[in-house]
Amino acid sequence: MTDVSWADKLSAVSAGLGVVTAGIALLIARTANKAAHQSSRAAEQANMTADSVAQIERDRWQYEMTPRFDVTITRLGQGSDQASLILTFEGPPALERLDEVEIEIRDDGYTHGVGLAGGPDEQQIAQTIWGPYRFKPGINDSSADGRLSPAVPLELGEWLKRALEVSLPPSWTDRAYWSQRYAGAPVRLWVRCRREGYQPWTLTYNVEVTDPQ
């Protein structure tokens, strides 16, 4: 049996220690990588939580700053086919002013599809104001079809006054039927508001038309 020299034994021990050391180093590296990954995930979750809280706070503030309006529509006289819309900016007080307030007449909420051959097409249906009133075209820069009153600035406590008239029945509809269809129906509105530093607001109103006192 060949004797093993101390040098060979030392070399073998050194090699074994090297393997152990490499194993320990690999374990330490894996542990460090895992810790770093966990730390990174924790940081991401913390950022996501902070972002979520900030977004909730922004949404809450946006909601609390939603403009409040009083909207009335009054006929100009008993049986008149004209009326006056008054929109008053009532709050919240912290908002103070609006850069733009736009009012649009909404349709009655029903689906109006294209009918039989010879009936109205999609463009004619879209151009019809399906409701009892429209803005008087050209008055206060209202649109030619009477659907839109363009955006204007408004201070807290101020009001807008807009002229309305009975909507026109489309050419394929009997006038008497049209009048009966919308007799007593509310005027449906979009009120769109903008203020620098805030997301736009879109508000809806269904306003009863009343006779003058």
Image (tube, grey):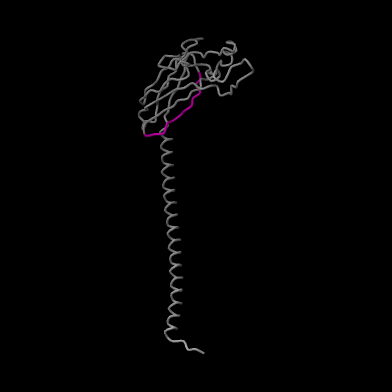
The magenta stretch is 197-208
Whether residue 138 is situated above or below residue 205 in the rendered picture? above
Whether residue 206 is situated above or below residue 177 in the rendered picture? below
Whether residue 19 is situated above or below residue 102 in the rendered picture? below
Image coordinates for residue 195, horizontal then vertical, percent: 38, 30
Image coordinates for residue 121, horizontal then vertical, percent: 58, 18
Q: Quadrant of residue 33?
A: bottom left
Which sits in the foreground, 209 or 123?
123
**Left-right relation of 49 to 119:** left
Image coordinates for residue 46, horizontal then vertical, percent: 42, 51
At x 44%, y 83%, the residue is 8
Which sits in the foreground, 190 or 147?
147
At x 46%, y 87%, the residue is 4
Is 40 magenta? The answer is no
Image coordinates for residue 143, horizontal then vertical, percent: 44, 17
Q: Quadrant of residue 180?
A: top right
At x 42%, y 35%, the residue is 62
Which sits in the foreground, 45 or 83?
45
Whether residue 152 is situated above or below residue 175 in the rendered picture? below
Residue closest to the far right = 116
At x 38%, y 23%, the residue is 152
